Amino acid sequence: MCGIVGAIADRDVVPVLIEGLKRLEYRGYDSAGIAVINDRDVRRVRRTGRVSEMADAAAAEGFDASLGIGHTRWATHGGVTEANAHPHISHGVALVHNGIIENHEEQRERLRALGYVFESQTDTEVIAHLMHYHLKQGGDDLLAALQHVVKELTGAYALAVISRAEPERMVCARMGCPLLVGIGEGENFIASDVSAIVQATRKVIFLEEGDTAEVTRESVRVFGADDQPAQREVHVSDVSLASLELGPYRHFMQKEIHEQPRAIADTIEAAVENGFSPALFGDKAGSVFEDIEGVQILACGTSYYAGMTARYWIEAISGLPCNVEIASEYRYRAAYANPKHLVVTISQSGETLDTMEALKYAKLLGHAHTLSICNVPESAIPRASELVCYTRAGAEIGVASTKAFTTQLAALFQLAVVLGKIRGMVDAEEEATYLEALRHLPGSVQHALNLEPQIVAWAERFAPKQNALFLGRGVHYPIALEGALKLKEISYIHAEAYPAGELKHGPLALVDAAMPVVVIAPNDALLEKVKSNMQEVRARGGELFVFADQDSNFSESEGVHVIRTPRHTGVLSPIVHTIPVQMLAYHTALARGTDVDKPRNLAKSVTVE
Ligand code: F6R
C-alpha cells in the first residue's frame, strides 16, 4: 500500500526520491508525488498512474533540490485524483502520510471553523493544516509542531514533513505504520520500507510506536512518545539491491518462483545444521513450548493457507490441537481463548493490519504466548510477538506471494517437529527421517521448477477460460486453495478450490466441458479416493489437469492431462506441489497479458482494514 521516502543531502535528492518511489511500487499504489524545498519555496508534482509519469513531469519542470519527500498513494479516503495524491501542503508545510486518521472528520470541522480551506477529500490534508496551525501557535518549530499534532490524531500514521521555513531538516513520526530513518554519509533519509533507500544506505533506525524524529544532513535525533530524547539501535539491513532487481527475469513473480530452492535452503539452514531445536524460534522458545497445550494460527490470504497446511503437520506430528483462523474474522469474534494455546501469526510483510489487530485481540483475550512467522525483519508483527522465526525468502516484490509461502511452510514444518520432540511424540529415528526430508526439499523444488515447459503448454489452454476448479485432499487441500488464489489474483480467471471429496456435495453442478479441473494428486494414502473424485468429473465431461507424482501410476487419456511432479516427497509434498500451481497461474496470466506483478486492485502490504 502507500509508501514514503524522504531525503536530505548535499546533492540533488530528486533522483533519490524517484528511485525510492519506484522501489516502493511493488506495494501497490494509484498515484505518486514529491515535494521539495527550493530557494525557500515548496515545489510539488503529483500524478495519478505510474511513478515514471510523475518523474517525467518533475524532470520537465526542472526539479532539483537537496531536501524533499515523496509518496505513493493507494486510495482509501477519496478517489484516485491528483488533488488527493500526496504530498499535501498547507502554507509552505508539505507532508506525506501512510495510514488512516480516524478522527479526521472532527478535525476537519475544527479547522474549517478556523478558516482553513480543503482541496482534497483525504484525511491527510487535515494533518497538513494542523501542522500549520500549531506552527502559528507555537513559535515556528517544525518538530514541536509535529509533536503537538500527533497528540491530536487518532488512528495510524507514518508521517514525513518538510517546511519552506526550515530548509535544513525534515521531521517524521510513527504510530501503527512502519517508518525508518536511513543513515548515510553527510546525508540522511526517511522511508516506510528499507527497499526505498537501500541504493543509498543500509544503516537504518526503525522508529518505535509513538516516536518522532528530526533528520538533518549530519544528525538524527529520535524522541519517544513522551517527547524526550530516545536511544534507538542502528541496524544494518541485509536487503540487497540484487533482490530488488529483475535480473534476467521478465517479472518479479517469475524470479521469485525460481528463487524458491535457495529461499527454502536458507530458511531451513539452521535446522539442517543443528537439528530441530526450539532455538529456531528464539531463546525463550524452549520454555514457552513446554508450557503450551495447543496452537491458534492467525493469518490472511496465502499466509492463511500456510497455516491451514501447518495444522495437518502440527496435529499429526506433535499431537497438539491446532486451530487456524482468518485474522480479519477472528478479531471480531468472541473467540475461545486458552492462555496455554500458542498464538502463531503468519505474515510475509509483518504489517498486515488484520493480522496485527488479531494478534492484539488474542493477547487481550488472555493468550499468554505468541510466535510470529514473518519475512520482514523488524516489522510490526514480529516486534509485537514474544517469539519470532524469520523466513529467509528475501524481499518479495511480486504482489502474488510465492517464495514467502513455501518458506512459511518450511518454517511451520520445523515448528511441528520441534513441538513433537518436546512432547515426546518424535523419536530419534523419526527426527532423522524428517531431517532427511528437509535436506532433500530444495532439490525436489528445483525438480518441480523443471516442469515449466509442460506447464506453459497447459497455460495456453487455460488462458481463454472463464472459470477453473482446483481439487486436493488432506494436506494438499490448502495447496489447491493456494493454486486457485494465485490463478484468480493474477489472471483474473474465476477459480475455486474444494477438498475433492466435497465435489459431489455441490460444486459438481458446475462441471461441464468448459470447466478445467486441476487436481493435486500425490502418491499418498488418499490417492485412490482422489481417483474416484476424478471419475466423477470425467463422467460429467469436465477436463482434468492432474499433477501426479512420478511414482503414482497415472496415464493420460481423453480429457485427462497429466504432468508428473517429482517422486512423492512424503510429508513435505505440499511444498513441492505448490510450485506447479504457481507456474500455472504465472503462465496463464502471461498468456492473458495481465500485469502479473501488480494485479489490479491489489496491494502488497495490506495496512488498512
Ligand atoms: C496472495 C497474497 C495475499 C497475502 C495476504 C497476507 O498472493 O499475497 O493473500 O498473503 O495479504 O499478507 P501477509 O502475508 O503480508 O500478511
Image (tube, rainbow, N blue to C red):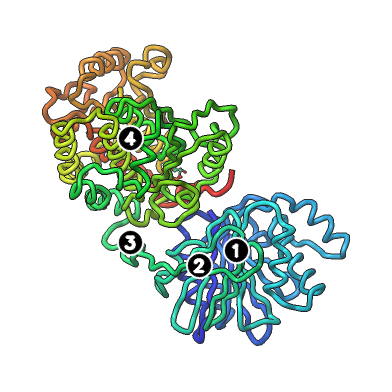
Q: Are marks 1 and 2 in contact (CB under 8 Å)?
A: yes
Pick whichever of labels 3 and 4 is earlier in the sequence: 3
Q: Amino acid at mark 4?
A: Phe
Q: Kindly identify which residue carries mark 2.
A: 232
- Mark 1 or mark 2: name the one nearer the start of the chain: 1
Badge 3 marks a residue whose secondary structure is: helix
Q: Amino acid at mark 3?
A: Ser
Q: CA distance from mark 3 to mark 1?
A: 30 Å
Q: Quick check: can you spot residue 337?
A: yes
Mark toward the start of the polypeptide (3 vs 1): 1
Q: Is residue 52 visible?
A: no
Label for residue 462?
4
Of callouts 1 and 4, the N-terminal one = 1
x and y, in percent, of residue 78 in the image: 68, 52
Q: Residues within 10 Å of mark 1 (few under 14, many from 20)?
A: many
- Which residue in the structure is indicated by mark 1? 211
Q: Residues within 10 Å of mark 3 (few under 14, many from 20)?
A: some
Question: Could you give the CA–CA distance between mark 3 and mark 4, rounded to whole angstroms?
Answer: 31 Å
Dot 4: what SS? helix
Q: Is residue 571 above or below residue 348?
A: above
Name the residue type under label 1. Asp
| Label 2: element kind | loop
Residue occupying the point 34% across, 33% down: 310
In the picture of the structure, the residue carrying the numbered disc 3 is 243
The reply to whether the C-beta atoms of the residues labelled 2 and 3 are less than 8 Å apart is no
